[in-house]
Image (spheres, rainbow, N blue to C red):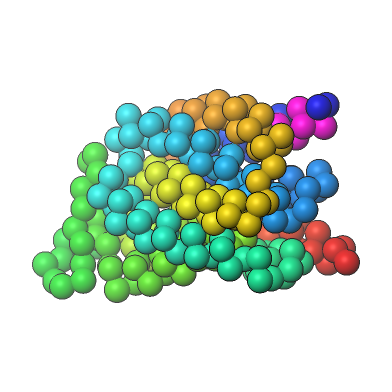
């Protein structure tokens, strides 16, 4: 019981930071659970469950702050949720070490991409096939569907396979490839994280890898982390959110690589 309590408090602190960047915290949740002794498949399943509850709480905070694009979240969320189910189901064809290595590579790419691009790219509204003009609050931006749709599907699949929310990859996708403002990307990612996490959780659970003794108590605690993190994000400058995203993502990639290297 003491061990679960300590892990829950650690994940609560992580939930505050990860919610601020729209990631949900799945990569750190899974890593923490693995380091606490859970097998990779159980850690991935519990991580998805915690993600769903935490991101759901944060989603309401961002919606109230007018930084959540419901149309964008619905379209991209449906795609990521469907592919996350497939990824979660086929994950059991791979070893835990293989999943960790895939996880590490994808995280490093996402974190590096956010560091390499200093400014958000913005485009003027376009009246062309394959381009979607959106407004969220006072922000107007253009989504290039030719880029967004295939990358979103790939993001959902790999996120479900390794047991993370997809926010680690969806935020760079929206900011760098789609020109979505950072705050809107963070808020919208929270809704997509909830959908992806729930679908991935179901896919993993079908194989009987859900451990409620760990997942439920931790989820109850981290809901409050999601609420707190969402409120702080609404008061933080976008450039600081972007830096926080990049740093935490690269740290997670490094730690998971080390963990995979130590695995037998």
What residue do we see at 63% from left, 57% from top?
A: 207
What residue do we see at 48% from left, 39% from top?
A: 55
Give, as a single range, the part of the protein colored magenta: 3-8
Residue 189, position as x, y percentages in the image: 42, 48
Is residue 6 shown in magenta?
yes
Q: Can residue 137 be seen at all in this image of the molecule? A: yes
- Would residue 164 appear left or right of 97 to someone viewing this image? left
Residue 95, position as x, y percentages in the image: 74, 68
- Would residue 111 appear left or right of 65 to someone viewing this image? right
The answer to which of 35 and 131 lies nearer the viewer is: 35
Is residue 77 shown in magenta?
no
Residue 136, position as x, y percentages in the image: 25, 44
The answer to which of 46 and 172 lies nearer the viewer is: 46
Q: Main secondary structure of the magenta part?
A: helix
What residue do we see at 74% from left, 64% from top?
A: 96
- Would residue 225 appear left or right of 145 to someone viewing this image? right
Quadrant in which the C terminus appears: bottom right
Residue 232, position as x, y percentages in the image: 49, 30
């Amino acid at each position: 019981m003491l061990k679960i309590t300590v892990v829950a408090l650690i994940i609560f602190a992580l939930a505050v930071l990860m919610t601020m960047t729209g990631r949900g915290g799945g990569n750190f949740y899974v890593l923490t659970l693995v380091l606490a002794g859970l097998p990779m498949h159980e850690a991935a399943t519990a991580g998805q469950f915690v993600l769903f509850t935490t991101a759901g709480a944060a989603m309401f905070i961002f919606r109230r702050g007018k930084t959540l694009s419901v149309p964008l979240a619905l379209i991209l969320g449906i795609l990521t949720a469907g592919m996350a189910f497939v990824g979660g189901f086929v994950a059991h064809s791979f070893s835990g070490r293989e999943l960790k290595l895939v996880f590490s590579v994808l995280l490093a790419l996402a974190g590096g991409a956010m560091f390499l691009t200093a400014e958000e790219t913005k485009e003027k509204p376009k009246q062309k096939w394959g381009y979607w003009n959106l407004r969220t609050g006072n922000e107007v931006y253009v989504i290039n569907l030719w880029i967004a749709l295939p990358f979103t599907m790939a993001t959902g699949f790999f996120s479900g396979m390794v047991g993370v929310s997809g926010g680690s990859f969806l935020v760079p996708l929206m900011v760098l490839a789609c020109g979505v403002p950072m705050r809107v990307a963070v808020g919208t990612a929270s809704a997509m994280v909830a959908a992806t996490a729930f679908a991935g959780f179901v896919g993993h659970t079908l194989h009987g890898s859900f451990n409620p003794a760990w997942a439920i108590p931790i989820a109850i605690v981290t809901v409050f982390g999601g609420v707190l993190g969402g409120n702080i994000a609404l008061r933080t400058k976008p450039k600081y959110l972007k830096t926080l995203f990049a740093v935490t993502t690269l740290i997670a990639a490094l730690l998971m690589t080390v963990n995979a290297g130590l695995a037998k």
